[in-house]
Amino acid sequence: MSRFCELSGKGPITGNNVSHSNRRTRRRFLPNLQKKRFYIPEVDKWVTLKVSSHALRTINKLGLYAYLKKLEKKGIDHGVKL
């Protein structure tokens, strides 16, 4: 199971662990992903998505249907059949 948000596309990034003596070792920063079930009343359908907390905040602000339409307008494939 890949660690990417299905809507915003956020994924892992890399960086350094820095010790007290300033030694650096590589590490991964993983996105805050949540598996969430959404109801879309416009199409009378339930969908389960793995989304980041950033995408959840945007969905709370705009609504899921409007957010999906916005992604379609930008040309981003979100994988949800409307």
Image: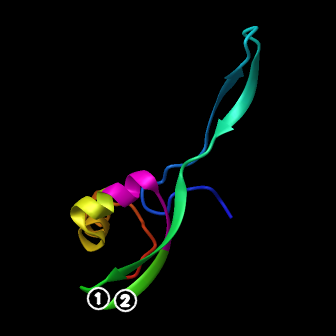
What is the x, y in percent for residue 6? 49, 63
User: Which residue is situated farthest in the top direction here?
Assistant: 21
Q: Is residue 72 above or below residue 15?
A: below
- Vertical position of residue 61 compared to residue 25: above or below: below
In the image, taking residue 11 as reference, residue 20 lies left or right, namely right
Q: Which residues are magenta?
A: 49-57
**Horizontal and vertical percent for residue 21?**
76, 8
* Helix, strand or loop at mark 2: strand
Q: Quadrant of residue 35?
A: bottom right
Secondary structure beneath dot 1 equals loop
Q: Position of residue 62 (x, y in %)?
A: 22, 63
| Residue that label 2 marks | 45
Residue 70 in the image, given as x and y percentages of width and height = 26, 62
Q: Which quadrant is home to the C terminus?
A: bottom left
Q: Residue at x 68, y 24 (%)?
A: 16
Dividing the picture into quadrants, the one containing residue 81 is bottom left
Evaluate if marks 1 and 2 touch, with contact meaning CB atoms under 8 Å apart.
yes
Colour mode?
Answer: rainbow
Q: Give the labeled residue for mark 1.
A: 43
Residue type beneath disc 2: Lys
